Image (spheres, rainbow, N blue to C red):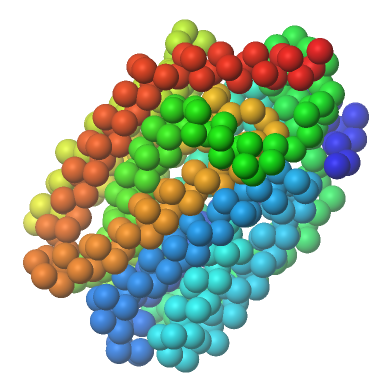
Amino acid sequence: MTPAPAGLASHPHYKWHVVGMLWWISFFNYADRQAIFSVFPLLEKELGLTPIQLGLLGSSFAWVYGLSAPLAGNIVDRIRRKAAILGGLHAWSVICVATAWARNFPQLLFFRAAEGLGETFYYPASMSLVSDYHGKRTRSRAMGFHQTSVYFGTIGGGFFAGLIGQHYGWRWSFIVFGGLGILLGFLLHRLLHEPERGAADRSDAGTAAVPAAGGRMRLGDFLKTIWGTPTVLFLMAAFMCANFVALVLLSWMPKFLYDRFHLSLAMAGLTATIFAQLASMAGAPLGGWMADWLRRRTPGGRMLVQALGVFAGAPFVVLCGATQSVAWLIVALMAWGFFKGVYDANIFASLFDVVRPEARGTAAGFMNMIGWLAGGGTAPLVVGYIAQQSSLGTAISLAAIVYVAAGLLLVAGAAGFARKDTARVEKAVAGQAR
């Protein structure tokens, strides 16, 4: 691995510049995946798709994304993360453009699933890279700021895909977003640099920032370590639940608005995303700040902040599906979005508190597998089935039960296991550097 040039890496603000560059990549990561939901009515009309088929388009991405995440994470721990990040950006952007050539449901399903394969490398690589620039004192804030790109990307993908589709057809939505992503990859090639793995953790421990002596963790050893780290298991189960709820609202809210309130495609896509995502932009930095503060006082501090986010958001999930008023729906989306941001800021920061630096890419990959395969992969399809049997509003409201389950898992993990698991990682990092 080639580390960042000494002068650039030592610049006091470069670690925040890295977050800024990754912010733009993450923006297109989410804009590309969100775009399809805003053109559901066009796909339904042009290709004659059923609610189950529309649900499969959402689930297929999540299934491939989740199934390939552990392998992607393991690869990320063995190669330069810069290569994984920029290579993934080019791959999913090309696939996004190619989606415009789909002529029937099987072809559309293929491209949608393939995009999940391209995007699965990004989060393990980017979060691992950020964790080596930001230590215990700034990690949640850095990841919380990065998380705001998810919300901007979701808004941009939701609104502009609907707007472009409304005026030029759904195919141009994918051409525009994919083309811009390809250009961004070329622009950032010389600006993004690779840090030494574990640098920030060794700095926290007061030791020299040298490469880890133990090398990369083998997959078998990783699985044994994770099985022996209960906090990780609780975090992954909670992420599965939280991601289920997020995908319910993100995938079906545009159609819910289009059907129940008769909004245009562009306005349905915008309304479904902008209020929740703008509120999340406020919630994520606050959640990051709260977690960095509470983490200095208790090892499970980040998890407790996440639990606050899902518990407080659950009543507003119910309101989203139950209300007959656009005004109250907007209130519910904003409140849910704010508390979702509080949770989201700490998804990987909480995980990395109990995972050693050389295994963080793999850990993030497994986290994504559980969250997207068992959570996000089932949500669009389950909601599509319930909507076909009952109503879309009922299906959305029922998702609140899953949110409460996530909160209970987080509290149990923080109270019962976080202290011991965090101490084990800190001891291992300090021992590597001696």
The residue at 49%/34% (across/down) is 227
Please indicate whether residue 67 sits to the left or right of residue 394 in the image. Answer: right
> Toward the viewer: 172 or 44?
44
Residue 200's quadrant in the figure?
Answer: top right
> Toward the viewer: 116 or 312?
116
On the image, the x and y values in percent for residue 429 come to 70, 19
Q: Is residue 58 above or below residue 412?
A: below
On the image, the x and y values in percent for residue 96 come to 57, 72
Would you say residue 417 is visible in this rendering?
yes
Would you say residue 126 is visible in this rendering?
no
Q: Is residue 206 above or below residue 129?
A: above
The residue at 51%/11% (across/down) is 296
Residue 321's quadrant in the figure?
Answer: bottom left
On the image, the x and y values in percent for residue 62 come to 44, 61
The residue at 16%/51% (across/down) is 397
On the image, the x and y values in percent for residue 324 come to 9, 56
Residue 433's quadrant in the figure?
Answer: top right
